[in-house]
Image: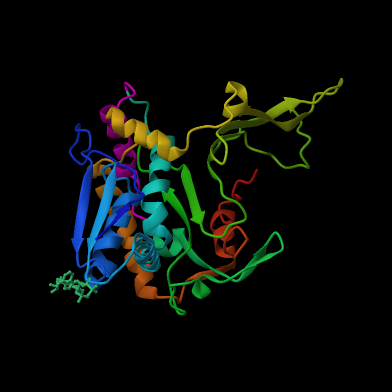
Amino acid sequence: MHEQGFKASSTGLVPGMPPEPCVVVILGVAGDLARTTLVPSLYALGCQRLLPEPFALLGVARRAWNDDTFRDAIRTYAQEKYDTTGVVRDMVQNHLLQLLCMAAMEPPVSYDGVTLRNETVKVLQAIRPVDVQRDCVLGQYRAGELDNHELRAYRDEENVPPDSATPTFAALKLTLDNWRWARVPFYVRTGKRLPRKCTEISIYFKPTPHLMFPVDNGGQWHNNILTFCLQPNEDIVQTFFAKQPGPDICLRPVTMHFRYDLTFGITHPPSAYEWLLHDAMQGAQTLFARSDLIYEAWSLVDPVMTYWEAQGARDLSLYPAGTWGPEAAEALVARDGRVWHMR
Ligand SMILES: NC(=O)c1ccc[n+]([C@@H]2O[C@H](COP(=O)([O-])OP(=O)(O)OC[C@H]3O[C@@H](n4cnc5c(N)ncnc54)[C@H](OP(=O)(O)O)[C@@H]3O)[C@@H](O)[C@H]2O)c1
């Protein structure tokens, strides 16, 4: 028998109730059922913050596994599953849609788990079903290079079948059918093996109907942009137009940068998981998904997956590892006269 702490964050499965720590015992943990179903399911729950904390997995089998072998096996079971999970189920369904909800929700009447999540679920309810052929690009990385290091293709990674059609990149255009966001497009993208890890939300403001000042920006108009950076640093960056020095009236884009850690003198900010554990212990549920939100998110993502799985690898756009994704993703925004935001 071996014991393994399972990397997971927590939530209350019963609304309003703090989660109970628990141990799941798998009898026959070395077998097929555990490998293909039980451990991947626990992993998926963990990724969606639906496991209590602390959580432990106890395995029983006949073979003489020690703790290290057991940990390796569990890790492999979870990794193998990524190939049948892919970036849409792994990232879009929960992380990206949650961020979209945070950006697009109406102000809640107070900051608590019930009222905040009431507002976020309304955002998902307003998202129009995705026109997969027109508004969705899925890709998979091929061999590439980053910082003079060669990166292998996804299909050459360990535990990945050589003909895998699993997407490692997704870009979508989403539209909300509600009063505030009618005709405002939301573009989301996520991927593996991109040039750097960053999580941010950028809001492009509409240009004023008429601009009375000349702009020194190569003849190009430029939107004011407000960017909320979540990773690697917590920043807020505002790009706007300012008058250039001198007697002439002429504007050009400038940026104003707020860095949370520098402003407040934080040298070692707590990790995201530390915050989650803290909130779990306090019974604070604002950061945890509620079941209605999960149902809405899956009902949006399921048709996308159904379509793409029926296509197999046929329409999957390959992109070199170490780049920002397939050209088709650039085209998705370019046809609306836009580019992906890059700082
Ligand atoms: N596979 C499925 O999709 C599936 C679906 C529904 C139900 N089931 C049922 O779930 C059960 C397990 O299925 P499985 O496919 O995982 O079987 P399996 O691949 O044959 O694995 C059996 C597991 O049980 C362990 N085991 C067997 N005898 C044991 C004993 N005396 N003491 C301790 N551990 C023992 C084995 O350990 P060692 O490997 O170390 O010998 C192995 O980990 C079966 O009853 C099966 O009918 C399976």
How far across and down, in percent of the image, does residue 274 sit?
41, 36
Looking at the image, how many numbered discs can be counted on the residues?
0
Q: Please name the colour scheme applied to the rendered image.
A: rainbow
Quadrant, the C terminus: top right
How far across and down, in percent of the image, does residue 133 sit?
43, 65
Give the extent of the magenta segment. Answer: 109-130
Position of residue 233 relative to residue 301, above or below, is above
Q: Is residue 121 left or right of residue 167?
A: left
Q: Is residue 58 left or right of residue 194?
A: left
Q: Nearer the viewer, residue 164 or 340?
A: 164
Position of residue 91 relative to residue 123, above or below, is below
Q: Is residue 127 magenta?
A: yes
Q: Is residue 10 magenta?
A: no
> Where is ligand 1, by quadrant?
bottom left
Looking at the rendering, which quadrant does residue 134 occupy? bottom left
Looking at the rendering, which quadrant does residue 141 occupy? bottom right
User: Outermost residue toward the bottom?
Assistant: 163
Quadrant, the N terminus: bottom left
Position of residue 333 relative to residue 13, above or below, is below
How far across and down, in percent of the image, does residue 288 sit?
32, 38
How far across and down, in percent of the image, does residue 216 sit?
79, 35
Query: Of helix, strand and loop, which mostly describes the magenta segment?
Result: helix
Q: Nearer the viewer, residue 41 or 122?
A: 41
Residue at left 46%, top 52%?
173
Q: Nearer the viewer, residue 29 or 8?
A: 29
Residue at left 69%, top 29%?
241
User: Outermost residue toward the right?
Assistant: 247
Q: Is residue 88 left or right of residue 17?
A: right
Residue 11 appears in the picture as rendered: yes
Residue 180 appears in the picture as rendered: no
Residue at left 57%, top 61%?
325
Residue at left 38%, top 42%?
98
